[in-house]
Image: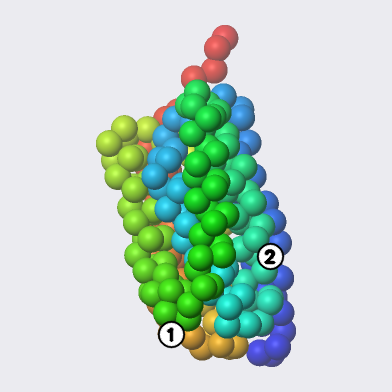
């Protein structure tokens, strides 16, 4: 039963993450706007994903416990480009991309660097959620923000709590997923709360 549960959690997480950001990207493209999406939140989330992936690779943890992160990083990068595009400042994307790429190599130069970064990773990821929440509270309009994307993110955190307990039992990673689960649910509820009714033209 444990093996079946682990298999289901791993592969359902990968399946969900394969299209996790697609509803958000589609919502932006359909609205032709980045309204409601916090750029600082997106940048912090991408940084958190990058640190987490580098940590897992550095310590050689089982591939299936973090295989979704390269997919999430690629989708976040695409989402970030969409935000820059609809905000009319695509040129600003290049410096951010350069920083993220160089960080990948810097993080693994010393063990203390990757350990420190991982300890800060939870705070970085939590800050990304709070940045999105703060933005939603400010504008009181979820605009092009996808509740489905945030809801699916909550599901993947729940499954990763299970897989972490059943494999590495890494306390740092476990705490991160518990906090992210709570915050993702909070953001999902806030997005739904501030969803404006669509008025159809007759």
Q: Is residue 17 above or below residue 89?
A: below
Residue 100 showing in the rendered view: yes
Foreground residue among 190 and 123: 123
Q: Determine the image quadrant of residue 80.
A: top right
Residue in the image at 42% along x and 53% along y: 44
| Position of residue 196 measured from the top left corner of the image (x, y, whole percent) | 42, 30
| Position of residue 23 measured from the top left corner of the image (x, y, whole percent) | 61, 43
Mark nearer the viewer, 2 or 1: 1
Residue in the image at 70% along x and 88% along y: 3
**Secondary structure found at label 2:** helix
Q: Residues within 10 Å of mark 2 (few under 14, many from 20)?
A: many
| Position of residue 139 measured from the top left corner of the image (x, y, whole percent) | 31, 32
Residue 151 showing in the rendered view: no
Q: Is residue 6 above or below residue 96?
A: below
Q: For this view, does 150 lie left or right of residue 22? A: left
Residue in the image at 49% along x and 20% along y: 199
Foreground residue among 91 and 67: 91
The quarter in which the C terminus is drawn is top right
Furthest residue to the front? 109
**Secondary structure found at label 1:** helix
The quarter in which the N terminus is drawn is bottom right
Colour scheme shown: rainbow
Q: Which residue is mark 2?
A: 14
Marks 2 and 1, the one that precedes in the sequence: 2
Residue in the image at 53% along x and 26% along y: 86
Q: Is residue 74 above or below residue 66?
A: above
Q: Which residue is mark 1?
A: 171
Cα–Cα gap, marks 2 and 1: 22 Å
């Amino acid at each position: 039963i444990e093996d079946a549960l682990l298999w289901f959690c791993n592969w359902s997480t990968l399946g969900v993450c394969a299209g996790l950001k697609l509803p958000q990207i589609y919502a932006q493209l359909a609205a032709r706007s980045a309204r409601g999406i916090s750029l600082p939140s997106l940048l912090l989330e991408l940084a958190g994903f990058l640190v987490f992936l580098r940590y897992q690779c550095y310590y050689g943890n089982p591939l299936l416990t973090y295989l979704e992160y390269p997919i999430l990083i690629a989708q976040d990068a695409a989402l970030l480009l969409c935000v820059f595009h609809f905000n009319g400042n695509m040129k600003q994307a290049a410096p951010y991309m350069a920083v993220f790429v160089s960080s990948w190599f810097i993080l693994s130069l010393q063990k203390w660097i990757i350990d420190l970064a991982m300890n800060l990773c939870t705070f970085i990821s939590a800050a990304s959620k709070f940045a999105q929440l703060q933005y939603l509270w400010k504008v009181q309009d979820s605009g092009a923000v996808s509740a489905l994307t945030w809801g699916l993110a909550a599901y993947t955190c729940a499954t990763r709590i299970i897989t972490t307990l059943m494999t590495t039992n890494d306390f740092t990673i476990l705490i991160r997923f518990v906090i992210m689960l709570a915050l993702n649910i909070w953001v999902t509820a806030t997005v739904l709360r501030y969803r404006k009714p669509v008025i159809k033209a007759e």
